[in-house]
Image (cartoon, grey):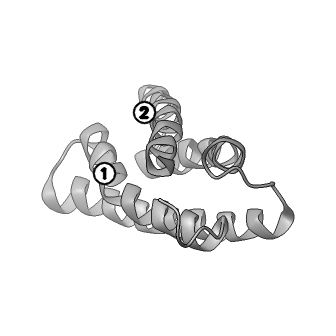
Amino acid sequence: MKVVKFGSVGILNTVFSYLLFCVLIYLDVFYLVASTLSFLAGTLFSYLMNSKYTFLAYANARSFVKFLVIMLASLVVSLLLLYVFKNLVGVHALIAQVLVVLVRFPIVYLLMKHVVFNQVHSY
C-alpha cells in the first residue's frame, strides 16, 4: 500500500513539476535550468507529503537531510539522463523528462523507504 501512496504523491509532484518545467521551457529557460528549478520546487512538497501521508513519519531535521541528499543525487542523475536522452539519443526535452521520471521512480522509492523513513519490512 505504501508504494501506491508513494506513487500517488509522486504523480501529484510529477504533474506539478512537469507543468512548471513546461512553463519554463515556454519562457525559453535553458532546459537543464528548467529541469533543476522544477525538480527543486517539487522537493519540499514531496518530503512533506511522503513523511505525513506515505510513510506516516514525523518530519525532522535528520530525515530531511537524508531526503535532501537522496534528492540531490537523484537530481544529478536526472540531469545526466536528460542530457543523454536529449543530446545523445535525440529525444525532445519534454519527452526526455518523462523518461527520466520513469527511470528514477523505483530507485527513489526504495531509498526513501529504507533510508529516509526507515521502513525495512513493510511494503
Q: Residues within 10 Å of mark 1 (few under 14, many from 20)?
A: few
Outermost residue toward the right in this view: 61
Residue 35 image offset from top left, x and y in percent: 47, 47
Which numbered dot is residue 25? Answer: 2
Residue 22 image offset from top left, x and y in percent: 42, 30
Q: Is residue 71 above or below residue 118?
A: above
Which numbered dot is residue 27? Answer: none
Element marked by disc 1: helix
Number of marks in picture: 2
Camera-nearest residue between 118 and 75: 118
Q: Is residue 70 above or below residue 37?
A: below
Outermost residue toward the left in this view: 89
Residue at the image position 23 percent from the left and 57 percent from the top: 85
| Quadrant in the picture for residue 83 | bottom left
| Residue 54 appears left or right of 8 | right
| Quadrant in the picture for residue 52 | top right
Query: Nearer the observer, disc 1 or disc 2?
Result: 1
Residue 111 image offset from top left, x and y in percent: 52, 69
Camera-nearest residue between 105 and 89: 105
| Quadrant in the picture for residue 59 | bottom right
The tag earlier along the polypeptide, 1 or 2, is 2
Residue at the image position 65 percent from the left and 41 percent from the top: 53
Element marked by disc 2: helix
Residue at image mark 1: 102
Q: Is residue 17 above or below residue 46?
A: above
Residue at the image position 46 percent from the left and 31 percent from the top: 15
Residue 105 image offset from top left, x and y in percent: 39, 55
Q: Amino acid at mark 2?
A: Ile
